[in-house]
Amino acid sequence: MSDLADIKNLDDIKLLVDSFYTKVQKDNLIGPIFNEKIGDQWPAHLERMYRFWQTILLEEHTYSGTPFPPHKHLPVAKEHFNRWMEIFTETIDSLFEGKLAEEAKLRAKNMAEMFFYKIEYFRNGGRNFFES
């Protein structure tokens, strides 16, 4: 049995987001992409991420916006999304255990897959790679 608790409140969301993005910023593969795109706007980005995850996991509706558009022109490929997911999963598993922790991993996985396919779609001029 683990001593880890589930995600319960905004403080837990902040711990998750801060821990995750600290790792992301230092990562050799995805760190440079994030740091280039976000630049000196990390505090604002983190604040948006707190609200995003608070809305998704705690059903406290503090986030409004469309998460995809800022990502659609990023120079990323499948390996970047895989690394993002790997870091996210490691972060969750090191901090939390329970229903919302599992929900966070599922939501992140679904979002990463959707973003990857949508980015590929935009890159291919509105055609997906299943079309000839």
Image (cartoon, rainbow, N blue to C red):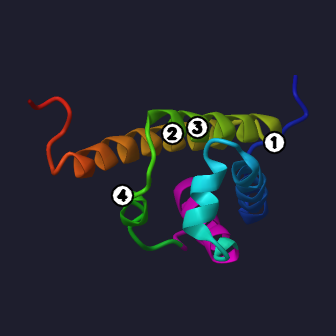
Q: Which label's residue is closer to the chain start, 4 or 3?
A: 4
Distance from Cα at disc 2 to Cα at disc 1? 21 Å
Q: Which residue is mark 4?
A: 72
Q: Residues within 10 Å of mark 3 (few under 14, many from 20)?
A: some
The Cα–Cα distance between marks 3 and 1, rounded to whole angstroms, is 15 Å
Q: Is residue 25 visible?
A: yes
Q: Secondary structure at mark 3?
A: helix
Magenta-drawn stretch contains 71: no
Identity of the residue drawn at 51% across and 39% down: 81
Q: Which residue is mark 2?
A: 81
Res. 54 in view: no
Q: Are marks 3 and 1 in contact (CB under 8 Å)?
A: no
Residue under numbered circle 1? 95
Residue shown at 64%/62% (left/top)? 35
Q: Quadrant of the C terminus?
A: top left
Q: Amino acid at mark 4?
A: Lys
The image position of residue 127, as x and y in percent, is 14, 43
**What's the CA distance linking mark 1 and mark 4?**
30 Å
